[in-house]
Structure formats: C-alpha cells, structure tokens
Image: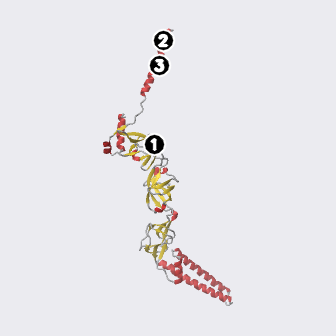
Amino acid sequence: MKRMTTVCLLVAGLGVTSAAVFAAETEMAQPAPMKPVNVKIDAKQMQALGIQVSVLQRQTDAVLASFPAQVMAPPNSEQIISSPVAGLVLQVLVQPNQAVRRGAPLLRLAGPDWGALQLQLLQTATRATLARLAAQREQSLFDEGIIPQRRAQEAQAAMQESTAALNQARAALRFSGMPEAAIKRVETSGKLEDSLVLHATQAGVVTSIAVKPGQRVEAASALLHVAQTAQLWLEIQVPAAEAANWQPGTKFKLQGRDITARIVSLSPSVSAGSQTLALRAVIESGAHGLRPGEIVAVELPAAGSAGGWSVPLAAVAHDGKQAYVFIRSADGFEARPVSVLASAGQRVRVQGALKDGEQIAISSIVALKGAWLAEKEKGGG
C-alpha cells in the first residue's frame, strides 16, 4: 500500500513538472512583437537619392482629383444656320466664339435661286392685284343686274387663289431669312435685293463656321452654329475604373475658378481607345466666363475620402496587400502601415498611426522601400 502511494505521488510530480515545462516552451515559442524597422539615412544620402519630404496635416475635406473637361452647350440650346438656297457665300460677318444678339447679321449669300424667289413674289403680287380689281368690277356689274351671279363668284374664287399664291411667295422669302420689312419693300418697289443676309434668331455665341467667302453651297448646307450660353454643360473624361466614385448629384468646382457644377449623368459606354468614361455635368454658377469648346480642369471629390491624411499617390509603398508610408525619424525613415481610404488621380487619403507635423517621404520611394525590405530581412530594428 505504501509502495503504490509513492508511485502515484511520483507520477503526479512528473505530471506537474511536464505541464510546467510545456508552458515554458510555449511561452518561449511565441514571437516578440515586431518593432518598426528604421532605415538609417542621413541628410547627404537623402540629397543623393533625391528624397523629398512633406509635412503631414490632417484633412477634413475630401480628396480632390483633377481631370480635363470640355465646355459644351446643351443639345437644345444650339442652332444650326443653314443655307436656304443654293448660291455663293459673299461675306462672313462674324468670327468664331463671337457673342451675337438676336437679329444680328451673320452671313451674306447670293445666287440665282434667291432672285427667282423674289421674282415669284412680284409675279404673284401683280396677279393678286389684277384678280382683286376684276372681282370688284364683276361684283359691281352683278349688282347692276348686267351679268349673272356665276361670273361674280368665279371672279371671287380667282381672287382668293391669287391671294393664296401671294401669301405662299411671301412665306418662301420669310423662310429663306428675308425680314418682313424687306419683303414689303420688294413688293411695293418692284426692285430685287442683290443678296440675302442671314440673321441670328437667338442670342448666343458663334461656336463654329463651316464656310468661307467665295465658297459655293447647296440648299440646306450647314453654314455656322450659334449656341446659347445662359446654361452650359461640362463633359469630363475620367478613368473607367474610378468612375464609380462620382454619381449623379455630386457637386464640384473648376480648378482655379469660382465656378460650381453638378454631375447629371454618366456615359453607359467606355471609350475603347483611352478606357475613359464621360461624365456630363451642368454648370450651376459662374458660367458667364466660359465659352463652348473651351478646355478646363475640374476637381472632383473622391467618395468617402473625408478625414485622415491626404498624401501623394507616389508616397505610398506596398508590401503584399499592406500599404506603408515612410515617416522621417531622428536618423532616417520609419515605415508605418496605413489603410487607404480613397484614391483619386495623383492624391490618396490614408489613415494610420500618424501625427500632424510629421514629415513623410514623397519621392524616391522605390529606393526607400528597397532599403527597408533589406533591413527587414536582416531583422534590424
């Protein structure tokens, strides 16, 4: 009985000893927390490598990405001035991007078709005058009982037909761009106009001119474009991969100008050559200083990028899926892990164990990353 008790106690003692040993081994096997790896670089080495630094400042606004945009007129605000007749361009009275008022002369044309329209006006005016006099005479004779009523009715019908033909001739000239005063002047004086001057039917800006003096044109040929500039649009080309950052309703500003705009639509297709997508935006204020066709730069805010620190895209290095930035230390640079909140263009918003006033490397990041990885392999701290 004593022997068995001794054995049990020995086994129990060994068990305790084994557990203690296992716990000690487990504690020794656990790796110590990794210290930040410091890359030692002095001022001369920084200058030789071309390393530049920038001071960190916490940002409360969103990351702004700069993209080119073209000013354009809405489709319903642009008017095409076309040639009403075939003829010769005698004179262009405006210049591209010139502001014009309603009724301003734009272009002068001449041609045989223009003379034929005026001749038709004079002929129908003469026939209408004769028909009117004949109808009055026939009505007078019918009232005296000299002729039957049928002749008076026939004269009235002929007068109505000639009046309709005269109205049609006037409408043809009016449709061709001849002012009402000029039509009446030709009709009363019998003198034809040598040329036709086309006038602006709305106030706006001449966006393009397709003809030159001396050029022959066919009827319905486009001569120039006039666009209203009271409201303008922007067409912005952005990378297709980043287009989801900007949805309809997003407001932004033009770079260097006090002009605000709002995105209204996104193109459903991507340009095959440039892999960009077009955003359409309407300018809400300050459009008076812009002209259709002008190229400007816009600053689009990246979605969900408020807070954190805004740094250049080139300042962020990656090791696997983890992003790092290099912070200036007493004797070099320290790689600190960060998380990327948003990226837009050449700026990125990051968040991590950073402080206001610290200096961050913004150039020669490849050299710093190479030195940092070498220090990591050696286990430097």
Is residue 321 something that shows in the picture? no
Q: Give me the disc on residue 16.
A: 3
* Residue type at the position of mark 1: Gln
- Looking at marks 2 and 1 on the same chain, the residue that comes earlier in the sequence is marked by 2
Residue 176 drawn above or below residue 40: below
| Distance from the alpha carbon under mark 2 to that under mark 3 | 15 Å
How crowded is the residue under tag 2: few (<14 C-alpha within 10 Å), some, or many (20+)? Answer: few
Q: Give percent across and percent down for residue 24.
A: 43, 24
Residue 154 quadrant: bottom right
Q: Is 178 on the left-hand or right-hand side of 139?
A: left
- Tell which tag, 1 or 3, sits nearer the viewer: 1
| Distance from the alpha carbon under mark 1 to that under mark 3 | 49 Å
Residue lying furthest right: 145
Q: Give percent across and percent down for residue 9.
A: 48, 14
Q: Are marks 2 and 1 in contact (CB under 8 Å)?
A: no
Q: Is 322 on the left-hand or right-hand side of 153?
A: left
Q: Give percent across and percent down for residue 264.
A: 52, 56
| Distance from the alpha carbon under mark 2 to that under mark 1 | 64 Å
Check disc 2 and report the residue beneath it: 6
Q: Do the residues labelled 1 and 3 touch (CB within 8 Å)?
A: no
Residue 100 drawn above or below residue 10: below
* Residue type at the position of mark 3: Val
Residue lying furthest front: 357
Total labels: the figure holds 3
| Mark 3 residue element | helix
State the quadrant of the C terminus.
Answer: top left
Q: Give me the disc on residue 351.
A: 1
